[in-house]
Amino acid sequence: MAEGYDYLLVEPGTVAVVTLNRPDVLNALSAAVLTELSRTLRALDDDPATRVVIITGSGTRAFAAGADIAELAALQSAVDAKVMARTGQALTRQIERMRVPAIAAVNGFALGGGCELAMACDVRIASEAARFGQPEVNLGIIPGYGGSQRTTRLVGRGQAMYLCLTGEIIGADEALRIGLVDRVVPAGELMNEAHRVARLIASKAPLAVAACKRAIDTGAHLSIDDALEVEASEFADLIPTADFEEGTRAFLEKRGAHFTGR
Ligand code: COA
C-alpha cells in the first residue's frame, strides 16, 4: 500500500483506517473518490494482515455529504446517470462482500451517498454530532447508491419511506432509535470507540468472522429456509479449522484463545 492517495488518508494495519479526505466539499463522493476507495479497500481486503477496516471522514463537519453535486449537475444522459449509480452500487456491494468487516465511524454529515456508504458497512458508530439523511428528493432525483433499498432492509419500509420521501436530516439519537446506527458516542470518543470495537472483532477467529459476515449478508436476501441452509454450511465448514479446535480447547482449559486464521 505504498502508493499515494489523492482523496483518501490510508493507515494500513490489523485495524486499517481509511479517511475520506475532501473536507473543503464535506468529503463529497466524486467518481474519482469512489474509484480510489474501491481500489484501496480491495488491496486492504486482499492483505491477510488486515482484520477490520474503519471508514471515516476528515475534518469535523462531515463523514460524506453525498455524491458530488457538481458531477451530478454535469450528467448529460440517462446512460451516464446509470453508469454513475452502478459505480456507487458496485462499491457498496464490494464493501458488503469483503472478507473483513467494515466499521463506519460517522463523524458528521452522512447524507445521500455518505449515508449509503455508511449503510453498506457492517457496523455504524456515530458521533453525537453526526447527521443522516437521503436528501436526493431536494435535487429532483432518488438515492442511487443503494439508498432506496438498504434503508428498507436496515430500518424497515416505514422509516425508509420517511427518510427518502421527506429528505429530512436526522440527528444521531434519532438514527440510533430507528436502527440506522448501532452506537452513538461523544464526538471526542468516536475513533476510540471505533478502534475498541475493531480490536474486539480482530481478536476473534478470522475465518469465523468472515463466515459470519457472509452468512448474514447472503441470508438477508434469501427465504428463511435457504438462509438457514447457508448458515448450516458455513457452520459446518468451520469445524475442521484449527481455530475451532483452539477456541474450544482454550475454553475447556480456562485460558484465552490464540487464533491463527487457519
Ligand atoms: N457535492 C459537492 N459539494 C458539496 C456537497 C456535495 N454533495 N455538499 C457540500 N458541498 C460543498 C458546498 O458546495 C460548499 O462548497 P463551497 O465552500 O465551495 O461553496 C462546501 O461543501 C460546504 O458546504 P455548505 O453547503 O456551504 O455548508 P453548510 O454548512 O451551509 O451546509 C449541508 C451543509 C451538508 C447541509 C449542505 O452542504 C448540503 O445540503 N449538501 C448537499 C447534501 C446532499 O444533497 N447530498 C446528496 C447528494 S445526492
Image (tube, rainbow, N blue to C red):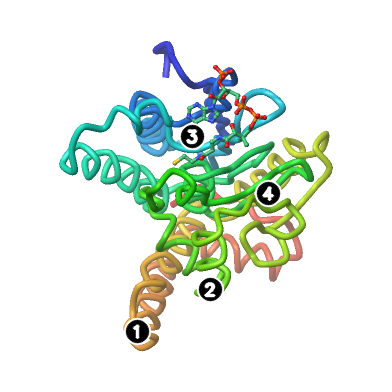
Task: Name the residue carrying label 1.
Answer: 223
Q: Residue at x 50, y 74 (%)?
A: 157
Tell whether label 3 touches label 4 (CB within 8 Å): no
Camera-side mark, 1 or 2: 2
Say whether mark 4 is within 8 Å of ligand 1: no
Q: Is residue 128 above or below residue 23?
A: below
First in sequence, mark 4 or 3: give its number: 3
The residues tagged by marks 2 and 4 sit, at their Cα atoms, a distance apart of: 19 Å
The residues tagged by marks 3 and 1 sit, at their Cα atoms, a distance apart of: 35 Å
First in sequence, mark 4 or 1: give its number: 4
Camera-side mark, 3 or 2: 2
Task: Name the residue carrying label 4.
Answer: 125
Task: Name the residue carrying label 2.
Answer: 156
Residue 101 is at least partly visible in this image: no
Q: Residue at x 76, y 41 (%)?
A: 129
- Neighbor class of circle 2 (other Cα within 10 Å; few <14, some 14-19, many 20+) is some
- Neighbor class of circle 1 (other Cα within 10 Å; few <14, some 14-19, many 20+) is few
First in sequence, mark 3 or 2: give its number: 3
Name the mark on residue 49. 3
Q: Amino acid at mark 4?
A: Ile
- Neighbor class of circle 3 (other Cα within 10 Å; few <14, some 14-19, many 20+) is few
Where in the figure is residue 193, as x and y percent of width and height? 75, 43
From the viewer's side, name the closer residue of 140 and 97. Answer: 140
Determine whether the residue tagged by mark 3 lies in a helix, strand or loop: loop
Name the side, left or right, on which 24 lies relative to 143. Answer: right
Q: Amino acid at mark 2?
A: Gly
Name the side, left or right, on which 202 lies relative to 69. Answer: right
Camera-side mark, 3 or 1: 1
Name the side, left or right, on which 83 lies relative to 232. Answer: left
